[in-house]
Amino acid sequence: MSTTAAATFTWPVGEFGFFFTDGEHLLIADETGLQAVDITSGQQVFAIDGFRPARQDRHTGTLIQVGSTKARLWTPPEWTPRAG
């Protein structure tokens, strides 16, 4: 029987956090914006202040924030299309 190691690191997530991934980063959206953390090291890679997506298109990777009068979109630059 083999075991698989799980990565563990501390990350402050505010209320109503949403989690996404682009395959290399954990993308965390909370009340402050979007933060990307390297899945392997746990180090923050980038942040987009004020961008709070609640949905991800699984085919394009685009993260979507919908407001009362507009939508904001962002697609990870190295997105690998998903099947399904």
Image: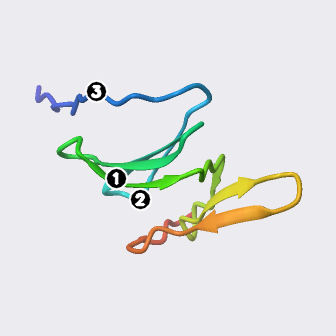
The label on residue 25 is 1
Q: Position of residue 17 (x, y in %)?
A: 56, 33
Q: Position of residue 22 (x, y in %)?
A: 41, 59
The residue located at (21%, 31%) in the rendering is 6
- Would you say the residues marked 1 and 2 are in contact, meaning their CB atoms lie under 8 Å apart? yes
- Would you say the residues marked 3 and 1 are in contact, meaning their CB atoms lie under 8 Å apart? no
Q: Quadrant of residue 9?
A: top left
Q: Earlier in the sequence, mark 3 or mark 1?
A: 3
Residue under label 2? 22
The residue located at (88%, 52%) in the rendering is 68
Residue under label 3? 10
Separation of marks 3 and 1 at Cα, in angstroms: 15 Å
Q: Label 3 is placed on what type of residue?
A: Thr
49 sits to left or right of 22: right
Q: Label 2 is placed on what type of residue?
A: Asp
- Would you say the residues marked 3 and 2 are in contact, meaning their CB atoms lie under 8 Å apart? no
The residue located at (76%, 62%) in the rendering is 71
Separation of marks 3 and 2 at Cα, in angstroms: 20 Å
Q: In terms of depth relative to the viewer, which is nearer, 29 or 19?
A: 29
From the viewer's perspective, is the residue at label 3 or at label 2 nearer? 3
SS of the residue at dot 3? loop
Q: Quadrant of the N terminus?
A: top left
59 sits to left or right of 11: right
The chosen color scheme is: rainbow
